[in-house]
Image (tube, rainbow, N blue to C red):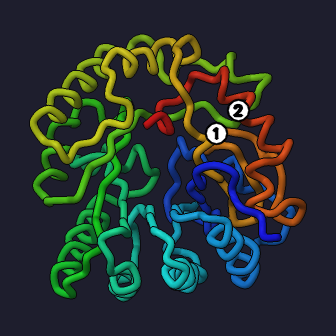
Amino acid sequence: MLNRFTATAPILCFEVTDRCNMSCPKCITSSHRSENRQRLTLYSIKSSLLLPYRSAGGKQLVISGGEPTLSEKLLPLIECAVSLRLKVFLASNLYRTDSRLLQELLKLMNDKKHMFMFSYDSIIPEEMKRIRGVDAHNEVTENIHSLLEKKELFGSRTKIAACFVLQKENAGSVAETLKFLVGLKLHKIIVQPVNLYGVIDINNFSAVSPPYEKEHLPKIFKAIDTLFSLAETFPEIRIVYPDQKRWRQHFTSPTTQKTECKSRNFIFIDSFGNFRGCNNSKVYANLADVGVVDFHSSDFYKKHVSLTNVCNICLHSST
């Protein structure tokens, strides 16, 4: 008998590649890149991941990286997902992105249930350079406009969204950056706080430190006030955890808060087939050892569930 998810089907988050064309000093996926296993083939992605996931009742695929547009598997992966009637969410940094690839993506994802989300850190070039490690501002901005122009030209129904991550480097330009994004008439602008916690497990989560020193807090707190004020004016601005006090605590005492973690609503798997419980957790198993459906009800995953019951550091998967 075919196995199915025992409750509401989790969202499948797949890192299609660990390669990236940026050099972010604070990259949260860098710890996943040293791996001796073989990367999953396109055949195994389709037959051992997407098909069993869909057959078990799965409905949504989130594609990230690394930078997904660097993967030769990206287009056939999305083509397969669309043919299986999965809802596709693609995240990209839009740096050095081929114009023809953007066109193909918009054609494949030509449905309002699909979403293309790009990251945008600052309207100020030097701030983005400090965050991304490369001088990417002008090219990323041009590619944003190119993406939106192509969407209009081809009449694509793909939803376009942006992600803004608050950190000390861009705290002073929050208003200008978000107003620029609002002016693009996007479907939504997701705003979340920086994550600098590394790999978390049941033994070390309570030992993480606040992301910044006290000297940076006045600027961060002012930026938080600005974020919440703008969100009241512009409904397309979506703050991942809409509690201003909790945002402040995220930057001062992240391990002392009572925030319900909803990462159990997701399955995270990388290009090597490694399963994690969330973006921050350690690897629990591999697709070669346990199937995507069985993993979600396995003893491996129960270890992560025990972590979600006590770990309070993160706001990213709380909404």
Q: Mark 1 points at which residue?
A: 280
Residue at image x 60%, y 55%? Answer: 9
Quarter assignment of residue 140 = bottom left
Q: Position of residue 202 (x, y in %)?
A: 77, 26
Dot 2 amino acid type: Ile
Q: Gap between marks 2 and 1, in whole Å?
A: 6 Å
In this orientation, does residue 289 appear?
Answer: yes
> Label 2 neighbourhood size at 10 Å, few (<14), some (14-19), many (20+)?
many
Kindly identify which numbered label has been placed on residue 262: none
Vertical position of residue 11 compared to residue 106: above or below:
above
Left or right for 26, reference 172: right
Vertical position of residue 294 compared to residue 233: above or below:
below
Instruction: Please identify the quadrant where the C terminus is shown.
Output: top left
Disc 2 vs disc 1: Cβ atoms closer than 8 Å? Answer: yes
Quarter assignment of residue 65 = bottom right
The extreme front residue here reads 1
> Label 1 neighbourhood size at 10 Å, few (<14), some (14-19), many (20+)?
many
Q: Nearer the viewer, residue 223 or 285?
A: 285
Q: Which of marks 2 and 1 is nearer the N terminus?
A: 2
Label 1, secondary structure: give it.
Answer: loop
Q: Where is residue 58 in the image (x, y as percent from the top left)?
A: 59, 63
Residue at image x 43%, y 11%? Answer: 214
Q: Mark 2 points at which residue?
A: 200
Residue at image x 63%, y 49%? Answer: 7
